[in-house]
Amino acid sequence: MTLPGRDSGAVITFDGPAAAGKSSVAQRVARLLGMPFVSSGLLYRAATLVAARSGADPRDEAAILAALSSHAITLEPGLHENRVRIGGHDVSAAVHTDTVDANVSFVAAHPRVRDWVSAKLREVPPPFAIDGRDMGAVVFPEARHKFFLTASARERARRRVGERSADLEAVAGAIARRDQLDARQSEPAPDAQHIDTEGLDLDEVVEVVLRHLAERGVVPRRAAAPGDRRENPERGDGSAREGSAREGSVPDGDGVDA
Ligand code: C5P
């Protein structure tokens, strides 16, 4: 029996390769539906940072697990961003460095590291929207709404650094390498809705996602343009209170956990 409020069907998953826009789309959709957004990549990044700080080789699974067992890593999902802490210290910025980028795929490839991350994610109370690589296929196979976002490596690099950057080719190359390293853990769920985001901006991708959700009875609480950032009319600054998200406003209609 599924306990009320713990129904993992009430999870919306967004998977796909690096820089496909998963987190921006998941965050925007979550906000429009009034539910928290969860970034699974932050836990892999925090594990990579802990391994580095402990002097563990990113290819040594046992050393990484030993480092993880001696550090308290916590993920705090929210409407606007996620915070990740190691031993109570906020490392949300520290996990976005070139060193972490260069090592995270090796750390994430270890099955027991993946089990450690998956177990932590399954502790988060639904509903929420989550982004990652294997959220729909492995971690939340029961989720009823799964999206898999794709775009060419060049398009993803362009989004990251801008069309005219001299770095475009280098960034596209780095993204393609990360795709290769992440390939094994990036299989789409068989029931995922694939969205080719090539040539689409964030608003347009969000619109496609909302259309799919609406067809299945999941609609935002109020009619809102996908680009509308004013979630909290009291503040009018695009922010919304975490408390209200935690109350888990189930969307009108059948809602995500229908
Ligand atoms: O999403 P983000 O780019 O922050 O993820 C960083 C890395 O963490 C990915 O390149 C991948 O190696 C790993 N990852 C993963 N499975 C996930 C999320 C992230 O293997 N669900």
Image (tube, rainbow, N blue to C red):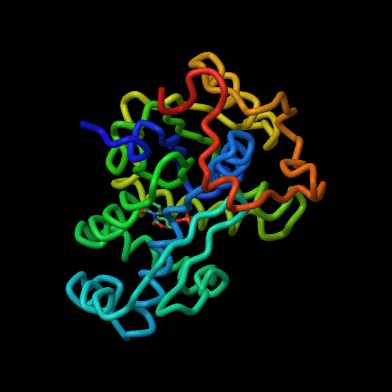
Q: Residue at x 56, y 18 (%)?
A: 214
Q: Residue furthest right?
A: 236
Quadrant position of residue 135:
top left
For residue 155, say whether it is visible.
Answer: no
Q: Position of residue 90 (x, y in %)?
A: 52, 75
Q: Can you say which quadrant of the picture contains the N terminus?
A: top left
For residue 80, say whether it is visible.
Answer: yes
Q: Position of residue 219 (x, y in %)?
A: 59, 23
Quadrant position of residue 44:
bottom left
Rendered view: 193 above or below 176:
above
Quadrant position of residue 156:
top right
Q: Can you say which quadrant of the picture contains the C terminus?
A: top left
Rendered view: 239 above or below 68:
above
Q: Residue at x 67, y 31 (%)?
A: 200
Q: How many marks on residues? A: 0
State the residue in front, 170 or 150: 150
Q: Residue at x 44, y 24 (%)?
A: 193
Rendered view: 205 above or below 108:
above
Rendered view: 109 above or below 214:
below
Q: Position of residue 76 (x, y in %)?
A: 48, 61
Q: Residue at x 67, y 37 (%)?
A: 202
Q: Is residue 43 left or right of residue 37?
A: left
State the residue in front, 232 or 45: 232
Q: Residue furthest left?
A: 62
Q: Residue furthest top?
A: 215
Ligand 1: which quarter? bottom left
Q: Is residue 111 left or right of residue 76?
A: left
